[in-house]
Image: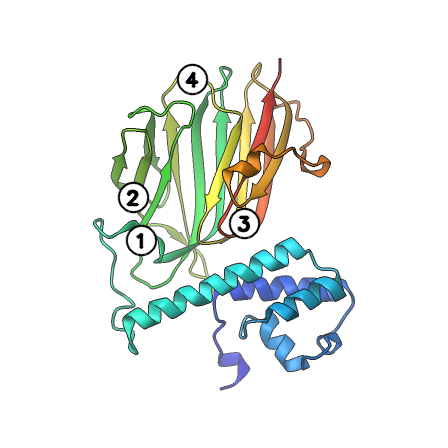
Amino acid sequence: MSQASREPLSDAHVRLGGLMRKVRQAAGATTRSVDGYSSGHISNVENGYVSPSAELIEQYVTTFGGDSGRLRTAYAVAKDESELRRRHHRGKGSTDAGASKKVTIDSPISEILASYNVDQREDYFRIDERGVITEMTSITTLSARHEDVWLFTNNFSYFSDKRRGVLRAESGMGCEIVKTEETDTGLLQIYLSIENAVRDEQGLRRFTYKICVESDVPAMPVIWHHEVWGTSTYALRAQFTPPCLPSKIWRFRGPSTFSAEVEPREESFLAVSSNGMYFYDFHDMNSEYAGLVWRWEA
């Protein structure tokens, strides 16, 4: 089989390979400059056709000065993607007979989540003059693991006010709400039909939805996102309204919510914004928490 007709192992491997290529090229190195590996092997890895070894990732870090956090995280995402595909094929046997089986509204959440990859997510939070997060609008981009994917799910909680009825979902462009479920502690699970999602030339599907907060209780000074399966970019936007503006605000990223409580390093602080708009993009997330923490002005 010629290289031109080969399929990459996964989107995660393509992202990892592209990141490795940028690191190598930034160091002025060619594919022949990687000790212990042929130029062809490096080309295959950087194009997503072959999975790199942990040793090769470390060589890109130590030899070419790559960002160890980003490379290792992207490598972990690619490994998880490979394992997920292996489990998927083991469960389906040697044929693809079940590959196009649709999930249903009654399918386990794990099955729904396993039917797609979230490639990018951009969340806009609006905080009003009382300090209440009044709404969150999400623009989500995902790639389907088979053509019949039609259902998306996610859950939300307003940590300052965990009563039933505090959260309400609204569908936006490219999706429709088909079901919502809520616990006694205010955890809202939403199910969206994405059959009308906007598709680009690469087959990625994009849609928007909104979570509205109906509460008078000011927000805890933290916004976080938990990424389970892996995404290339999580873009967080927060618009504060005077007089409830942050006196200090910083980003965090780590394996648990406790990461938000760690004393921030100097480079984690965001520059003070006079109009109350803050943003940060987190790349190559997998099994992590990330977000913004702030202190209210006195």
**Label 4, residues with CA under 10 Å away: few <14, some 14-19, many ≥20:** some
Q: Position of residue 202 (x, y in %)?
A: 46, 62
Name the side, left or right, on which 194 lies relative to 236: left
Mark 2 residue element: strand
> Is the residue 164 above or below the residue 96 in the image?
above
Q: Indicate the position of residue 174 as horizontal and vertical percent values.
A: 35, 46
Q: Where is residue 292 in the image (x, y as percent from the top left)?
A: 57, 34
Residue 195 can be seen in this image: no
- The local secondary structure at tag 1 comes to helix
Horizontal side of residue 132 vs 90, given as left or right:
right
Of the numbered discs 4 and 2, the one sitting upstream in the chain is 2
Q: Is residue 134 visible?
A: yes
State the residue position of label 3: 233
Q: Dot 4 lies on which element? A: loop
| In this view, the mark in front (3 or 1) | 1
Instruction: Residue under label 1, please give it.
Output: 112
Q: Measured from the top left, where is residue 1 in percent x and y?
A: 49, 86
Amino acid residing under circle 4: Val
From the viewer's side, name the closer residue of 177 and 110: 110
Q: Name above or below for residue 95 compared with residue 60.
A: below
Residue occupying the point 48% across, 54% down: 230
Residue ID for mark 4: 217
Q: Marks 1 and 2, Cα distance to the nearest angstrom?
A: 10 Å
> How many angstroms separate mark 2 from mark 3 (CA)?
22 Å
Mark 1 vs mark 2, foreground winner is: 1
Amino acid under disc 1: Ile
